[in-house]
Amino acid sequence: MSGRLRPGRLPYMTTHHAPEPVTADGRPVERAVTVGLGLAVLTGLGWIVGMIYTLVEWPW
């Protein structure tokens, strides 16, 4: 096939398929990120509760 195309014609295109995921265990990084974000949320909530407790119990 030459480099020129006739008007109205599409060039030949190959079909590419993405590989199928192996299993649910194929994403350990996603699981680690989810666990890390969950721990960060719990830590943040604990910090907020600690600050509220400090303000309530502070000797005025």
Image: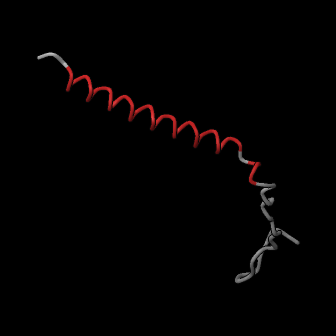
**Residue at 36% of width from left, 28% of height from top?**
47
Q: Is residue 30 left or right of residue 20?
A: left
In the rendered image, which quarter is residue 36 located in?
top right
Q: Is residue 15 above or below residue 54?
A: below
Query: Quadrant of the image for the C terminus?
Result: top left
Figure check: 45 above or below 22: above
Task: Tell me: 40 left or right of 1.
Answer: left
Residue 7: x, y in percent? 71, 82
Q: Position of residue 37 (x, y in %)?
A: 52, 39
At a point 74% along the width and 53% down the height, the residue shown is 24
Q: Residue at x 70, y 83 (%)?
A: 8
Give x and y (percent) for residue 2. Answer: 86, 70
Residue sitting nearer the eye, 6 or 47: 47
What's the coloring here? secondary structure
Near-viewer residue (56 or 2): 56
Q: How many marks?
A: 0
Find residue 31 and report its horizontal and vertical position in percent: 64, 44
User: Image quarter for residue 52?
Assistant: top left
* Residue occupying the far bottom of the picture: 8
Q: Is residue 12 above or below residue 23?
A: below
Q: Which residue is rendered at x = 40% and y = 33% of the image?
A: 44
Which residue is outermost to the top? Answer: 59
**Is residue 1 or residue 54 the one in the foreground?**
54
Which residue is outermost to the left? 60
58 on left or right of 4: left
Q: Quadrant of the N terminus?
A: bottom right
